[in-house]
Image (cartoon, coloured by chain):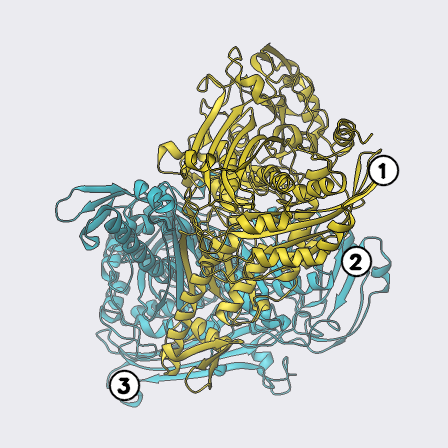
Chain colours: A cyan, B yellow
Amino acid sequence: MVIGKSINRVDAIDKVLGRAKFTEDLIPANALVGRVMHSTIANGLVKTIDTSKALLMDGVIKVVSCFDVPNIQFPTAGHPWSLDESHQDVRDRKILNQRVRHYGDCIAAVLAKDEIIAARAIAALNVEYEEYPVLLDPAAALESEADAIHLEYPDNILKKTNYTDGDWQAAVHQEGLLQLKKKYLTVPVQHCHIENPVCFAYMEGDRIVVVSSTQIPHIVRRVVSQALGIPLGRIRVIKPYVGGGFGNKQDVIYEPLAAYLTMVAGGHCVCLNMSREETFSSSRTRHGMEFYLHSWVDRKGNLAARYVKGVSNQGGYASHGHTVLANAISGYRNLYHQQAIRQEAVTVYTNICSGGAMRAYGIPQINFAMESHMDDLAQKLCIDPIDFRKRNMMRVGDVDPGTGIICHSNGLEECLNVGKSYIDWQKKRELYREQSGDIRRGVGMAIFSYKTGAYPSAMEIGSARVILNQDGSVQVQMGATEIGQGADTVFSQMAAETIGIEPDQVHVISTQDTDTTPFDTGAYGSRQSYVSGAALKQTCLLFLERIFCYAAERWGCNSIDLDLRKGMLQSKVTGQTVVSLKQLAMNAFYSREHAMHITAESSYQCKDNTYALGCCFAEIEVDIRLGRIKILDIVNVHDSGRIINPMLAKAQVHGGMAMGLGYALSEQMLYNREGKLLNGNFLDYKLPTAMDIPPLQVRFVETYDPSSPYGNKSLGEPPVIPVAAAVRNALLCATGVAIDQLPMNPPCLIKAFQAAGLI
Amino acid sequence: MVIGKSINRVDAIDKVLGRAKFTEDLIPANALVGRVMHSTIANGLVKTIDTSKALLMDGVIKVVSCFDVPNIQFPTAGHPWSLDESHQDVRDRKILNQRVRHYGDCIAAVLAKDEIIAARAIAALNVEYEEYPVLLDPAAALESEADAIHLEYPDNILKKTNYTDGDWQAAVHQEGLLQLKKKYLTVPVQHCHIENPVCFAYMEGDRIVVVSSTQIPHIVRRVVSQALGIPLGRIRVIKPYVGGGFGNKQDVIYEPLAAYLTMVAGGHCVCLNMSREETFSSSRTRHGMEFYLHSWVDRKGNLAARYVKGVSNQGGYASHGHTVLANAISGYRNLYHQQAIRQEAVTVYTNICSGGAMRAYGIPQINFAMESHMDDLAQKLCIDPIDFRKRNMMRVGDVDPGTGIICHSNGLEECLNVGKSYIDWQKKRELYREQSGDIRRGVGMAIFSYKTGAYPSAMEIGSARVILNQDGSVQVQMGATEIGQGADTVFSQMAAETIGIEPDQVHVISTQDTDTTPFDTGAYGSRQSYVSGAALKQTCLLFLERIFCYAAERWGCNSIDLDLRKGMLQSKVTGQTVVSLKQLAMNAFYSREHAMHITAESSYQCKDNTYALGCCFAEIEVDIRLGRIKILDIVNVHDSGRIINPMLAKAQVHGGMAMGLGYALSEQMLYNREGKLLNGNFLDYKLPTAMDIPPLQVRFVETYDPSSPYGNKSLGEPPVIPVAAAVRNALLCATGVAIDQLPMNPPCLIKAFQAAGLI
C-alpha cells in the first residue's frame, strides 16, 4: 500500500541541491535576448514607433513592432480547444498590439545580444500614441458613452449569462420569509509565483521549438500554432521544471512572441525572460468581482430563494474571460442549491491588467461574498452559523441542475465537526459574545465546495505511458505536468500501487515534450490526480496485462491467475512466486525466442466530476485603533477524498491558506487614474511573508470518492477558498462589524470601525 | 509512392545552418571538465600515481585513479546482451585500469574547472609503472614465453573457432585439381569519424544521465549500469545528433567513466571530450588480420575445396573481440560456399590499440584476401575473373550451412553485367594485356556479399512509436539511431509510405533518450532499415488500424473498408473520401464524445537475414617508379534490394568507396617497438582527402527482398568492402604483380615491383 504514505517528493533531492533544471537554466549561452516594449498608456492606439535609434545600437539585432507581426488574433486561455465554435476561447489579441488596451500592453519587441543592450534599445524606442479615456472598472466601461475597447464588443461586455432554477415566484412569496440584500466586493490580486514567465524558442528544420515555464505545454503548442498560422505539428513545446504557476501559466502570452522572434532571427534561439514588474503589469490577475446578493430564508433557517449578480472586471483582454465568473456563479449555486435560484453574470472589458485563471478560478471571490452573506443571514436569524450551514449545505447525491455534477462523496459535516471541535467553537463564541475595548477576539468559519477538473464545462482528457526497464523498474510518462505541486510524486505512488512495485522503482519523467509526451491538457482545475491519475491507472492496468501475458507465454502459467506484489509475479491461486519482474524484464528485452519492449500507453476521457469540500475556522484578535487583524489560530479541514500523500497534501493546504490570508488581509493591485499599476513589485505589493503567516493547522476528513481512480478529489486549489470569509466572519464575531470588501487591511477596517462608531 | 524518391534529408536544413545540436553543443556552461591520463607504456602495471601536485593546482576538483574505481570488469562491445552466459561479451576492463594493456590505456582521470587546468593537472601526475615486454602482433603474443596480457587468457588467445563443411577428403583428392596457397595481410586502420568521442554526465535524483555521441544509446545504458554496478533503470542515456561513428561508437568506452565522475562530483555535470590523438590511440580500430588461403579448383574453374585460416590482432582489450573475425570467416564462406570448406579463426590479444567494430565488421579484411585470391586463381586458370566468379558465386536460395542464412534475393549477376559494361571490361582487358614502360593501366574487379543485421549471431529487435498530431501529421519515435547515415530520412519515407501521408507530414524524433525511446539496439550491422524499418512498418499498420477504428466509430463507416492516401481516408469500395486525417485528428484530440490521443507502439523481433550483394570495378594507372596508383575510374554496383532514397543511397556508397580507397592505398596505424602509435593524427595518418578521391560512380541493381519490410537490404557498410581488392586486381591486370597486403602505398609497391624486376 503506497497510496496514503508520505513518501518524499521525487524531485526533492534535485530541487534541494539546485540540480533541477528550470527554463532559465536551459537557455543556451548564445541565445539572443528578446525584450518587450510595453505601452505607457492604458487605452489608445500606437500611431508610430520610431525604431531608428535602437537599430543603430551595437548589439541590437532586430526591432519588431505591432506593425510587423502576423495579422492574426488568437486566444490565450489555457483551455482544451473546442470543436464547437461558439465555445471557443475569445481571439482578441495579436502577438504585438497596435490597439493598446491596458498599461503595459505588448506593442514592440527588440532582439539583442544581451539583456543590457535590449533594455537600452527598448528605452530608445519612440512611440507616438493616440490616447482614449481610461476605463478602470465595469461601471466606467459600461457607461453609454464609453469607447469600445474591442471593436467586436461595442458595449464592452465580454459576455453576459443568466441562470434560473426552481419556481422563483412561489419561493420568494412564501409567508414569513426574512430577506437580506447586500453587495460584496473583491479586488484584483496577483499570483506571485516564484518563477516569472520565461520561455525561449528556436527552430529545428521548419519546426519551431518553444521551451517554456508553463502549466500547459500541449495547449501552448496549439496557441502558438494559432497565433502564427502554422500547422500544429510544426510546433514543439517543452516544459522543464516550473517554479509555480497558480493559473498564471495557464495562459499563453509570451510563447507566440518567442516563436515569432526565432523565425525573425532565422531560427536562432531567442529568450524572453520577464521581470517581476512585467509579470505584475502584463500577465494575468485574479479578477476583481462585485457580487449583489439577495436571499430569502424562513425563520428556521431554511434558504428559500437566492439571487446573485456578479460583475467581473476583465481588464484589457479576454484571457479565460467569462468562464471564471461563470465558475464563481456555478460555485455559488452548488454549495447550497436546494432552493429557487436566479443568477446573472456579466464580464466587462476595462483597461486594467487582464484577469485570468488563478487558483480556484473565481471561487475565492464568490466564497467571500457567499460565506460572508451566510454569516450575515445567520446573524439576522440569530442562528449559529454552523447550524445554519448544516441545514442548507450540499449533501451526498445532490445534483447541480446547472452542470449535472453529482455529489458523489461528502465529508463536509464531519469537516465542520472537526473544525468546530478544534477551534473550541461553542466556548469561544460564548466567550467572545460581548466584548468592549480596543482589542477584541472572535471566531469565524466558512465552508466551500470545489469541483475536480473542468468537466462538463470543458472536455477532460489525460494520457499516460508506462515503459518497462531492464531492472523491472518503470518509466512513467505523463501528459500531466509537475509545476511544483507534487504531481510527479503522487503519480509515482499511483503507478507503484497499481503495478505492485515500490515507488522508488517508478521513474516519472518530469519534462513534457509535445513531440513525445502523451496528450493531456495540463495542470489546472485541480484535475490531474483525478483525470490524469485515472489515465495512469488505466495505463498501468494495461501494462500489467501485457506483463502477465508475457509471463504466461514464457513461464507457462495462466495470465489471469497472476498478480504482481512487491515486484514479484505470483499465482493468485497458489500464492507461489512465478518470476520477479526484473527477471521477466531481462527476458523480454533479450530473449532470442520472444523479445519485446513491454510498454503501455492510453488516454482516458473523463466524463464525470466530484466535489471536494471543507471549511476554515479562524480565531482572530483585532486591534480596533490600528485596524489590524491578528490570526490567533486557523485551521482548514478538507474532504479531498482519499489523501495520496499526507505530507504533500498538508503542504498544499499550507500554501493555499497563506495565499488566502494574503487575499483576506493585504493583497491588492492598485492603479492610478491613467491605469498604471502603482504597486507592481514585491516592495509595494503586500504579499504576506513568512513573518506574517501564523502557524497553519490542517486536518483531513478522508472519504473515498467512487468516481475517482484512487478515491481522491481536488486539493490543489481548494485551500485558498474559505480563508477570507472565515477571517471576515471571525471579525464579525469579534466586533459586530460586517466587512464586505477585500482586502481587510487597516484603511478598510478603520473606515468600517469609524462608520460603526467603534472609533 | 514515397519509397524510392530522393527526398531531401530531414536534417539537411539544421545541419547546413549549423543549428543541429551535437553532444558538444549541449554541454552546460558550468560543466566540469574531465580528462583522462593515458598510460605511456603499452604493457605493464601501474604501481603508484602521485596526485599531490595536481591536487594543489587551483581549479582541480578531483583526481581519481585506477586505485579508486569500482572493482568491476565490464564489457564494452555494443552488442545486444545475451541471457546465455557463454555468449556474453568479454568483461576485461575496469573504468580505469591498473593493469596496462596498450599504450594509451586509461589509468587515471582529473576533474577540473576548464580544459587548460585539466591538461596541466594530467601533466602533473607522476606515474610509476612496472613494465612488461611489449607484444605487438599475434606472432609475438602467441610465443610460449609471452606474458599473459589478461590473466584469464594465459596463452593470449581471446578465442579460437573451427568450422568444417562438406566431405573435405573427397573434395581435395579429386583428380586434376589446381591448388593455390597464399597469405594475405591487412593492417589496423581507424574510423576517422568527424566527431570524436564526447559525452557528459550528471545526476537527476539518484539517477545518472549520460549524454553521448553514440550509435547505441540503449546499449550504453546497459554497459554503464554494468560498469558501475547500478540498476539499469537508474541510468538514462541521451543521444543527440552524431557526427559519424562507423562502428567506433558501437563501443562503450568513456560513458562509464563520465558516469563515475559525476558521482564523484556529487552529481555535478562532467564532460569528457576526446581529442583526435586520444581517439586514435585509445578508442578502437579495424583489426589487422592475416589470412592463410588454400584453394582447390578444377580446370573449368569450379571451386572444389577451400581452406582459410584467419588470425586477428585484437590489441589490448576484447571489445567486439572474436565476433569480428568470426564474421569475416563467415563472409568468406557464404559468398562462394558450394564446396568443401575448412576454416580456422584465432583472435589474439596483443599490446596495440584494441580492434573493434568498423564498417563491415571484418568483411573488408576477408574480402581483400578472398577477392585477391579469386583473381590469383583465375589468373592461374587463365579464366576471365568475372566468368570465374559467376561460375562459383552465391545464387538465390543458397543457404549458408554455418548460419542458416538464406539468399532471399540476388542481383549479383546483373551487378556484374552493369559493372562490366560500365568499365568496358572486354575491351580494356584486351587493351591492357601487354604493356611495358613505367606507366601502365589495368582494370580489376571484386564482388562481395554482406548480411543485413546481426541475426542469427545476435538477437535482433527494433521498436517504434507513432504519435498523431492535431494537424494530421505524425511524430515517429525510433529506437534506431541517426548517426549521419540518413536513417531518419529513410524512416520518414517508410512511415509516409505505410501511413499514406506526405513525408513532410512525418516528424522523426532524432534524439534518443532511453527514458522514453522505444528499445532498439542501435546503428550497426546495416540493420536499421531492415530490422527497425520492419518495426516501424508494423507500428504504422497498428497506428492505421486505430485511425480506421476511430473513423469507423465517429463517421459510421466500416474500418476494414478504409484506406489512407495523401492524408485522406477513403472507402476502398467506393473510392469516396470519408474525412481528412487532419479533421479526424482534431476530433480525436478534442471531441466531447470520444477523445483519445491516437498513438501506436510496438517492437519487432527479426529472425531472418538477407544478403546485399555487389561489386566494384576499377580502372587504374600505376606509375611504377613512383609506386603510385591513380584511380582512373571506379564504380560500385549494389544490389541492396529496393532503394528507399537513391540520393542518400548514392551518398552512402560514395562515402564507403572513399573509405575503401583509403584502406586500399594509404591508411595504416603505425606503432613503434614500445607500442606507441606513431601517426595518430590527421597530419601523419594518411586519410584520403577530397584531393585524393577521384569521381566515384555508383549504380544500383534493384531487387525486392521478400524478407524485408520494403524490399530493402543492407547498404550502410557494403560500399567499403570490395574496393581494395578491385584496385589490387586492376594492378595485377596492369603489371602482373600480385600485391597481397594493404595498404598498397608507395613503399609497398616499390618493394613489390623491385621483387618482380619491374624496377
The answer to whether one can see residue A516 in this image is no
Which quadrant would the C terminus of chain B be assigned to in this image? Answer: top right
- Residue receiving disc 2: A61
Instruction: Residue at 15% x, 44% y: name it.
Output: A575
- Residue receiving disc 1: B438
Image coordinates for residue A221, horizontal then vertical, percent: 55, 65
Q: Residues within 10 Å of mark 3 (few under 14, many from 20)?
A: some
Q: Residue furthest front?
A: B175
Q: Residues within 10 Å of mark 2 (few under 14, many from 20)?
A: some
Amino acid type shown at disc 1: Asp
Q: Residue furthest bottom?
A: A169
- Residue receiving disc 3: A171
For the residues marked 3 and 2, what is the alpha-carbon distance in whole angstroms? 68 Å
A268 relative position to A544: left or right: right
Mark number displayed over residue B668: none
Q: Nearer the viewer, residue A315 or A238?
A: A238
Image coordinates for residue B98, horizontal then vertical, percent: 53, 17
Which quadrant would the N terminus of chain B be assigned to in this image? Answer: bottom right
Q: Nearer the viewer, residue B229 or A686?
A: B229
For the residues marked 2 and 1, what is the alpha-carbon distance in whole angstroms? 63 Å
Same subunit, labels 3 and 2: the answer reads yes
Of marks 3 and 2, which one's residue comes earlier in the chain? 2
Residue at mark 2: chain: A
Say which element carries label 3. Answer: helix
The answer to whether one can see residue B629 in this image is yes
